[in-house]
């Protein structure tokens, strides 16, 4: 690509010069002009520019846009011993994430009405290191709260089609899902669906014990496929936007492709653990690997990568779902909490595997920054473009490290990546033109 300054240069209070910058159109050397926290102009690396502050980066790093993680369970208030806004946003910044969207459950109260949303906002307002937005929840009986939550600025709504794991956030039936989708269609809202079918799982063998193969058999791919078909049918009939959360079953990909070809408004995400881990490498009793839907086999993983490359999967997000160590490390896949904490290490985990498979860093950026921002509708984030927030990640793509749980900012640093060698180190994270430090300066985001 070729970068040029505009004929009339806007106000500039900082210039960042970097030899490798990932833009939406490619990688190039550039000088980035920043004023009042926004990117105001982009010019050649050697452009004659003066500013109060000039920062220069060499060939050993690449400047990326700040990542957007649209699937994070912060859990505060109510289960703040599991995670909280202070710890979660520090972990996000350390992992190159400059904006996250908090899920509506695992906190108490869940975000199922405006009053609960305001409780969340008050909890996050003064202690967030990065910018934070919120999803609303769709549960039985709160249909009348969906439009007020939308007006209050949530980015969309999450529902479960089976037991969520916490009693205060019950699932929707197929009928209730369609009723709520028709409400959302009236104001063009987005519904996020945890797609596993309760009848299929109810007919499968019960989860329990230390054997991972038994846990995998208890959450078969058919449960995902059936629930995704239910969500697609409801989206088709209602005309609403539907987003499939944390896709792990590659056998659902033909359903998704066909629905899109038919004009169904459908987007899909997957997660680092489904792209980097495989069932064959999970030891018995290693409940740090437990998540729902589960990590499947290597052939399934290969198909997810192909779907990413083909554009059938829109984005990669963490589904950071922590708990206390005593709930996670039970050694029994039936009783352990189902969730993986990867907010801080998602970028190097995905980059390590993407690089091995021949993908470019720019592709990873499109999956983990631009993609989530586009799906969730987060304005001013996800790309290094004039007018966007000056959110950057200074990334050393060739530097290697070993994951040390003690170095993670997660409140409960239980990780299936512990001891794993990864490639790619986040050296710095910038939020609106300021390096992230110990003083929180994240803002609360609202749907535009």
Image (tube, helix red, strand yellow):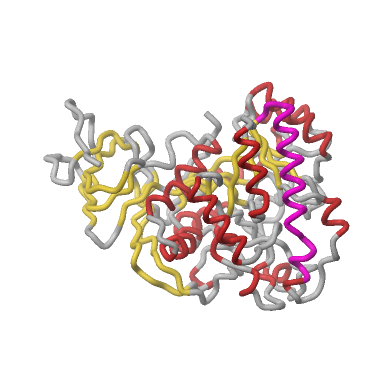
Quadrant assignment for the N terminus: top left
Picture quadrant where residue 160 is located: top right
Boundaries of the magenta span? 214-240
Vertical position of residue 6 compared to residue 97: above or below: above
Task: Tell me the quarter of the picture where residue 318 sits.
Answer: bottom right
Q: Main secondary structure of the magenta part?
A: helix
Q: Nearer the viewer, residue 66 or 352?
A: 352
Residue drawn at point x = 22 percent, y = 40 percent: 2
Residue displayed at 74% across by 27% down: 237
Residue sitting farthest toward the top: 186
> Residue 288's spot in the image, x, y percent?
65, 70
**Residue 392, image x, y percentages:** 36, 48
Question: Residue placed at 24% from the left, 56% from the top?
Answer: 57
Q: Is residue 418 above or below residue 378?
A: below
Q: Is residue 10 left or right of residue 336?
A: left
Does 127 sit above or below residue 342? above
Q: Is residue 234 left or right of residue 173?
A: left
Residue found farthest to the left: 48
Give me the residue at 32% from left, 52% from top.
Answer: 63
Residue 121 shows up from this direction = no
Give how far across and how far down residue 26 sits, in percent. 31, 45
Q: Is residue 392 visible?
A: yes
Magenta segment includes 117: no
Q: Is residue 221 magenta?
A: yes
């Amino acid at each position: 690509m070729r970068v040029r300054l505009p004929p009339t240069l806007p106000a500039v209070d900082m210039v960042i010069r970097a030899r490798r910058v990932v833009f939406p159109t490619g990688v190039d050397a550039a000088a980035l002009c920043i004023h009042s926290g926004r990117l105001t102009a982009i010019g050649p690396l050697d452009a004659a520019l003066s500013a109060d502050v000039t920062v220069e980066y060499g060939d050993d790093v690449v400047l990326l846009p700040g990542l957007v993680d649209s699937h994070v369970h912060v859990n505060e208030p109510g289960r703040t011993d599991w995670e909280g806004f202070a710890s979660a946003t520090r972990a996000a910044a350390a992992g190159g994430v400059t904006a996250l969207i908090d899920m509506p459950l695992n906190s108490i109260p869940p975000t199922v009405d405006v009053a609960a949303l305001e409780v969340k906002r008050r909890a996050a307002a003064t202690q967030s290191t990065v910018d934070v937005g919120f999803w609303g929840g769709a549960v039985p009986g709160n249909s009348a709260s969906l439009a007020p939550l939308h007006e209050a600025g949530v980015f969309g709504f999450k529902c479960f089609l089976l037991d969520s794991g916490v009693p205060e956030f019950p699932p929707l039936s197929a009928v209730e899902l369609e009723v709520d989708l028709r409400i959302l269609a009236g104001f063009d809202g987005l519904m996020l669906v945890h797609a596993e079918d309760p009848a299929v799982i109810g007919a499968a063998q019960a989860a329990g014990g230390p054997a991972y193969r038994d846990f995998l058999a208890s959450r078969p791919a058919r449960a995902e496929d059936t629930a995704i078909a239910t969500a697609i049918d409801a989206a088709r009939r209602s005309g609403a936007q539907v987003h499939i959360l944390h896709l792990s079953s590659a056998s659902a990909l033909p359903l998704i492709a066909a629905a899109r070809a038919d004009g169904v408004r459908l987007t899909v995400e997957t997660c680092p653990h489904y792209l980097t881990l495989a069932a064959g490498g999970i030891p018995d009793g290693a409940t740090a690997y437990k998540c729902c839907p589960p990590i499947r086999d290597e052939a399934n993983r290969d198909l997810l990568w192909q779907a990413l490359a083909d554009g059938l999967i829109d984005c990669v997000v963490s589904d950071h779902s922590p708990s206390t160590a005593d709930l996670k490390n039970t050694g029994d896949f039936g009783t352990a909490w189902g969730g993986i904490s990867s907010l801080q290490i998602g970028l190097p985990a995905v980059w390590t595997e993407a690089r091995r498979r021949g993908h470019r860093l720019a592709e990873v950026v499109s999956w983990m920054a631009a993609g989530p921002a586009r799906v969730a509708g987060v304005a001013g984030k996800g790309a290094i473009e004039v007018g966007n927030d000056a959110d950057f990640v200074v990334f050393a793509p060739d530097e290697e490290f070993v994951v040390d749980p003690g170095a993670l900012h997660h409140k409960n640093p239980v990780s299936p990546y512990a001891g794993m060698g990864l490639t790619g180190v986040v050296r710095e994270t910038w939020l609106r033109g300021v390096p992230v430090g110990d003083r929180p300066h994240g803002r609360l985001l609202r749907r535009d």
